[in-house]
Image (spheres, grey):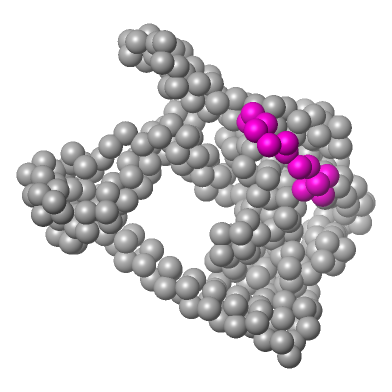
Amino acid sequence: MMLMKQATARSQPGRLVLAASVLLALLVAALWWRARDGAETSALPVTALDASTATPALGDPPRATAPMTVTRTAAAVAGTARAPRADWPASLRDSEPDGAVTLDANGRVIVSRELRRLFDYFLSALGERDVGAIRALLLAHVGALHGAATAAEVAALFDRYVDFQQALAAINPPPGEALRERLARVHDLRHRLLDAAMAEAFFGDEERYTEYTLDRRDLMADSTLDEQTRQQRLDELDTRLSPEQRSGMQEANTALLVDEQNRQFDALRLDPAQRQSEREALFGTEAAQRLAQSDAEQAAWEARVHAYVQARDALRADARRDIASRERAIAQLRAARFDAAEQRRIVSLEAIGQL
């Protein structure tokens, strides 16, 4: 039977790709937007819930006043933010902060998606430092770039953001709760703890995109629609998206096809030559070569992660260490085996129980 399937695969290049589930399509699209926006997932335990109930932002939120050109990174200010880096958590020490503080014409902090990204960047070090220590690092960083007054503004906003994340972590969704109901509860919590302006700046775009994806899911699942009517309504729904967002959806759909095709390759145990042929038929020779390189890189990454997990689990099982000692040793292990961006990825995967 396997040989018959392989023969079919060879005789019909490009036909292996099947229609994937609508939910998977939405999730892949969501992941594409998160990667595009460059946001790092916070290591707070709440992250898994927040990520599961909303897709990432599609662009910068609207701003009330035009910002001055004062969004400065640590590298732009010689001898200020670089000096204390030795005291930073190992996972952040060799990276530049993601996100930024932007000021308006009056020198006040603009509450923006960039600010949330900066908060998430520092919070990704949870596990190495507690929230209080992370807060101190953030404020020292902001103070070095923008001064004490700006740091005080950022402190108040950060405290509200952490309060929201902790409240979100405490939510226990009732069994069988519909996704729309859960999203509504999270929306209300955001507006209550952050206020309307901050909730809009931090989460407004992603909430609207989530509504779009849910409406699209419902259309795809509606068995009463014929294909022509369904496509017409999908086209109407897509008018909610900007040209940039539609382009992103196309890239997300390509990612979905690649993912589905890879699963079928694995199920059929196709050799590299057969994989190359199938990919060339669907995506072209150049793209197929890039995907083959991606296969090799993914295999190498998985091997590194597997080795890390084994070493980490050995540390966790070491009865001679107390909890604090184990956590320090694990943080040192991550720092030794992964660069800063990879460490944040590992911490995020661990926070949601994926490693």
Image position of 40 (left or right of 115): left
The one of 221 and 250 positioned closer to us in this rendering: 221
Q: Is residue 343 above or below residue 167?
A: below
Q: Position of residue 216 (x, y in %)?
A: 49, 23
Q: Position of residue 251 (x, y in %)?
A: 39, 39
Q: Is residue 257 magenta?
A: no
Disc count in the image? 0
Which stretch is magenta? 166-179
Give the position of the C terminus as an image quadrant.
bottom right
- Can see residue 52? yes
- Residue sitting at x 53%, y 21%: 215
- Residue sitting at x 42%, y 39%: 252
The one of 227 and 74 positioned closer to us in this rendering: 227
- Can see residue 57? no
Could you say which quadrant of the image residue 140 lies in? bottom right
Image position of 212 (left or right of 161): left
- Residue sitting at x 11%, y 41%: 12
Q: Position of residue 204 (x, y in %)?
A: 69, 30
Image position of 300 (left or right of 328): left
